[in-house]
Image: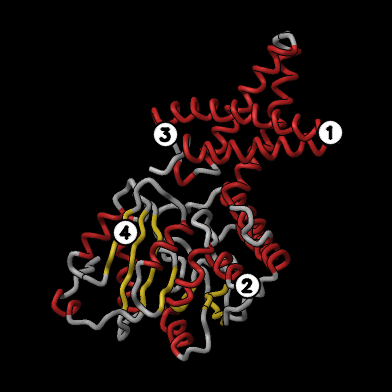
């Protein structure tokens, strides 16, 4: 497909009124398609597009940059050492200087021809956020989702409306446009983790955003494969709980705590197996079960809690060793706090809970700095 553009024509264009943010990971094949579609849909509009690429191994950033060499309206942010759709969207929106900014997928499932209508809706100043909805009259999920994902999307929408009192018909939509000043106001409260940035924006707005929904039909993916997996569900639930608690607890800490809770079950199963199958005495079995649980927790946290900082290769082994060390100190903190409280107030469950919380907070804080430190 010919995506070249006369350089002089592009350079003489006015400052962009609209920035379209496209978060990408392994979308090389869709890059020329989405750029061609935007050129056609936004004819007559001063626009730019920012690809925010999470260091795709397929060369997505390079493909976009090659087109940008001929069209200065195309910009590329390549993120190294960090991943996540929400974080990519926030970075892209903050990199814009246009008065309006849109977020959409680069996989051609979102209908780019809706962008001029969304822009017209915002221009009059009576609306802060325009959302492309599959749920309002005229919209449809279409063939873009499987039956299972349709059911999951419906359930997630219902949960968001129930817990967070979000009035959107389609809070799971990833296609929207908002005023740039709204981004500046809400950015400090937005989570860089997770996949549902629209829900985060609306919940962080605390009912103050003036919203209009426009219908669109969700299309089938053109190239590549979907990035959604079962871990996204846990990310989403973590975001719901975090927003329900008024952002007092971060999504990452909630995920870390969830993994820790699962580790209790793993510990008990490993303890029982060590006693029966390996015929170890209790102290030996307890030590073995502790290491099994810590190892399981490490790999689950690496896949889920710190998926944007996921360790591989030698760093994975080094991280496991530091995680063992962190959790060992956490056990001491747990026991020490529990004993201190129990000596002053001998109520076992209060002392036990306080110790567990202290251990969890220590493990989370220390592992964030030592095991999964930012690169």
| Residue ID for mark 1 | 348
| Colour scheme of the picture | secondary structure
Tell me, for residue 206, which label it has, or none.
Answer: 2
Q: Quadrant of the N terminus?
A: bottom left
Foreground tag (2 vs 3): 2
Foreground tag (3 vs 1): 1
Q: CA distance from mark 3 to mark 1?
A: 41 Å
Foreground tag (4 vs 2): 2
Helix, strand or loop status at disc 2: loop
| Residue ID for mark 3 | 312
Residue 140: x percent and y percent?
58, 72
Helix, strand or loop status at disc 1: helix
Name the residue nearer the viewer: 146 or 14. 14
Quarter of the figure with residue 94 = bottom left
Quarter of the figure with residue 106 = bottom left
Q: Are marks 1 and 2 in contact (CB under 8 Å)?
A: no
């Amino acid at each position: 497909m010919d995506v070249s553009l006369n350089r002089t024509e592009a350079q003489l264009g006015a400052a962009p009124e609209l920035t379209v943010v496209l978060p990408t990971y392994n979308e090389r094949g869709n890059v020329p398609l989405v750029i061609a579609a935007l050129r056609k849909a936004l004819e007559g509009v001063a626009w730019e597009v920012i690809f925010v690429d999470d260091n795709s191994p397929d060369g997505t950033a390079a493909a976009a940059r090659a087109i940008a060499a001929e069209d200065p309206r195309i910009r590329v942010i390549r993120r190294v050492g960090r991943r996540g759709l929400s974080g990519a969207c926030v970075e892209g929106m903050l990199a814009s200087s246009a008065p309006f900014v849109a977020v959409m997928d680069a996989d051609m499932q979102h209908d780019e021809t809706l962008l001029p209508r969304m822009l017209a809706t915002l221009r009059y100043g009576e609306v802060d956020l325009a959302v492309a909805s599959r749920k309002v009259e005229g919209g449809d999920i279409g063939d873009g989702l499987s039956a299972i994902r349709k059911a999951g999307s419906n359930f997630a929408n219902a949960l968001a409306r129930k817990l967070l009192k979000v009035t959107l018909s389609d809070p799971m939509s990833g296609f929207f446009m908002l005023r740039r000043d709204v981004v500046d106001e809400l950015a400090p409260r937005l989570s860089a983790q997770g996949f549902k940035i629209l829900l985060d924006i609306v919940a962080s707005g605390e009912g103050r955003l003036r919203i209009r929904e426009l219908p669109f039909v969700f299309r089938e993916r053109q190239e590549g494969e979907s990035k959604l997996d079962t871990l996204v569900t846990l990310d989403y639930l973590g975001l719901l709980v975090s927003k329900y608690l008024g952002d007092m607890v971060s999504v990452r800490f909630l995920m870390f705590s969830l993994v820790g809770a699962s580790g209790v079950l793993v510990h008990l199963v490993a303890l029982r197996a060590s006693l029966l199958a390996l015929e170890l005495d209790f102290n030996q079995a307890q030590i073995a079960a502790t290491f099994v649980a810590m190892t399981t927790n490490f790999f689950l946290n690496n896949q889920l809690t710190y998926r944007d900082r996921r360790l591989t290769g030698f760093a994975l082994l080094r991280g496991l060793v530091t995680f063992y060390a962190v959790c060992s100190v956490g056990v001491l903190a747990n026991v020490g706090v529990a004993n201190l409280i129990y000596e002053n107030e001998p109520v076992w469950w209060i002392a036990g809970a306080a110790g567990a919380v202290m251990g969890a907070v220590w493990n989370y804080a220390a592992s964030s700095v030592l095991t999964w430190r930012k690169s």
